[in-house]
Image: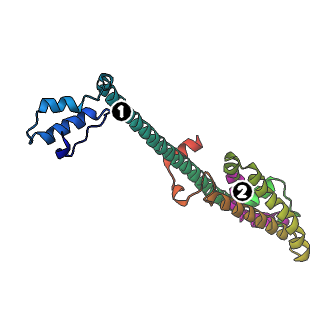
Amino acid sequence: AFAPLGIGIVPYDLPSSVSLAEATLEKVKDYDVDVEETRKVLIEDVTMDQLLSLEEEERRRLVEIKEREMKEKAEKEKVEREKAEREKAEKVFGNGTFLIVFFSLILTIIVFIFKEKLLYLIGASENTFKYANDYLTIYLMGTLFVQITMGLNNFIVCQGKSKIAMLSTMIGAVLNIALDPLFIFVFKLNVKGAAIATVISQAVSAIFILAVLFNKKTSLRLKFNMMAPDIRIIGSIMS
């Protein structure tokens, strides 16, 4: 009967059946058709359970949408929280590195100024002062390398990379052992040679550690922009 309208009567087993029926009624209003009869025919295949379930289906759909929105919000908050925590950790790391460099330079300057008194204070004599002074003068130039190796090595250990931390220490020790006889006996630099070998070995260890910490694959990276001193962070570190 409704073929001229392009309407096919099929069973409606979806919650949208009534809505589809109402849309069809709007379509047939312009024709000489009994609207009430049409309504009856359109929904005759829709069971009472289906009609009663429309509200339940709509409620379930809204609940699913709400749950999805809450899950997406929770995921977003988690990502933002992890990002904030990582940024804070990187700032603490950067400020810690800044303090290592700062105090290394301060220590070098202070010891260099008072090195004569310090050497006599720790037991140097007139006979040994020259050798002690030669060694300490050169060794002071490597204070920064020593502090970087000693200080930043702990940040590698904290990331669960104890083997790499051990390797950085071994590199310095083995290299120092190898360079000592080279500078002392081959180059005939005596005590100065021993100091130079120590500084070079510590510099290599420091470079190795910095290469690890600046690597993108490291879970907690060292970044130059995070080394800007922050009074609150420095205060918490110093306390």
* Element class at badge 2: helix
- From the viewer's perspective, tell me whether residue 124 is left or right of residue 141: right
Q: Does the magenta stretch include residue 135?
A: yes
The amino acid sitting under disc 1 is: Arg
Most frequent secondary structure within the magenta stretch? helix
Question: Looking at this view, is 35 or 180 the one in front?
Answer: 35
The amino acid sitting under disc 2 is: Thr
Looking at the image, is 171 positioned above or below residue 32?
Answer: below
Q: How crowded is mark 2: few (under 14 residues within 10 Å), some or many (20 or more)?
A: many
Question: Looking at this view, is 206 or 73 the one in front?
Answer: 73
**Picture coordinates of residue 197 (x, y %)?**
81, 67
Question: Looking at this view, is 32 or 74 the one in front?
Answer: 32
Q: How far apart are marks 2 and 1 (CA)?
A: 60 Å
* Residue at 78 percent of width and 56 percent of height: 167
- Taking the image as drawn, is residue 232 in sight? no
Looking at the image, is 175 positioned above or below residue 218?
Answer: below
* Residue at 33 percent of width and 34 percent of height: 14
**Picture coordinates of residue 117 (x, y %)?**
75, 57
**Picture coordinates of residue 213 (x, y %)?**
64, 57
Q: Quadrant of the N terminus?
A: top left
Q: Residue furthest front?
A: 1
Q: How crowded is mark 1: few (under 14 residues within 10 Å), some or many (20 or more)?
A: few
- From the viewer's perspective, tell me whether residue 4 is left or right of residue 212: left
Q: Which of marks 2 and 1 is nearer the N terminus?
A: 1
* Residue at 32 percent of width and 26 percent of height: 50
**Picture coordinates of residue 200 (x, y %)?**
77, 67
Q: Which residue bears the numbered disc 1? A: 61
Answer with the quarter of the image where residue 9 lies: top left
Q: Which residue bears the numbered disc 2? A: 149
- From the viewer's perspective, tell me whether residue 130 is left or right of residue 236: right
Answer with the quarter of the image where residue 56 lies: top left
The magenta stretch is 131-152
